[in-house]
Image: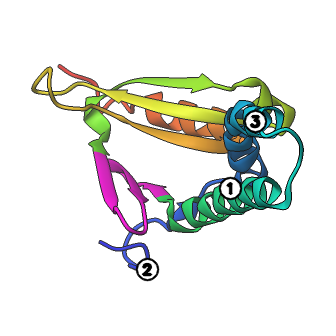
Amino acid sequence: MTPGDPAGPPWRRLDPRMLVVGPLGSLGRLLPLVLILMITGGGADPARIGIAVAAAVVVVAAGVVRWRTTRYRITAERVELHTGWLRRQRRSVPRDRIRTVDLTARLLHRAFGLSVVQVGAASGSPLESAGLSLDAVSTAEADLLRRELLSRSPADAPV
């Protein structure tokens, strides 16, 4: 099934506030490098400023591409996550294998009312990556997702 597939529940995007949170987080990690370039260069010559601006543009563009190419949906049987433009990744976790749903939020996420939903699942092998992560969904949506993914109807309960 593809993101445009009409069968099943609709595909959802991460919160648009991710367009601010993602690049700000990345720029924060690049700030020490930019400061070192400015300090060791003996001033702010146009080439160094150009490099810093180009790096900022690349980080913001990467954030936009990430938001545009990330989709998720929850069906009765699975949680599906599709990401990537150049390196596409399709993750799917069967609902009956879900063991944990953790909500986390770094300072920047909290400032914008966002959370990260980490779905942990039982896997058959210790080397196999189990679960998936939805970075930057609204806090209200994260709470709803957590309740939905952890709820089990009596028919789903093991006998």
Q: In front here: 76 or 138?
A: 138
Circle 2 or circle 3, nearest the eye = 3
Asked if one can make out residue 20 in the rendered structure from this viewpoint, the answer is yes
Give the residue type that dot 3 points to: Leu
Give coordinates of residue 68: x percent, y percent. Answer: 58, 68
Query: Residue 4 has which mark?
Result: 2
Q: Residue at x 62, y 54 (%)?
A: 14
Secondary element at tag 3: helix
Residue under label 1: 55
Query: Residue 31 has which mark?
Result: 3
Callout 3: 10 Å neighbours few (<14), some, many (20+)?
Answer: few
Q: In this view, does 158 lie above or below 7?
A: above
Q: In front here: 123 or 155?
A: 123
Comes first in the chain, label 2 or label 1: 2
Q: How many numbered discs?
A: 3
Compared across the picture, whether 16 is left or right of 91 comes to right
Comes first in the chain, label 2 or label 3: 2
Compared across the picture, whether 10 is left or right of 18 comes to left
Secondary element at tag 1: helix
Q: In this view, does 15 lie above or below 142?
A: below
Give the residue type that dot 2 points to: Gly
Q: Does the magenta stretch include residue 80?
A: yes
Q: Which residue is drawn at 64% across and 61% down?
A: 58
Comes first in the chain, label 3 or label 1: 3
CA distance for labels 3 and 1: 10 Å
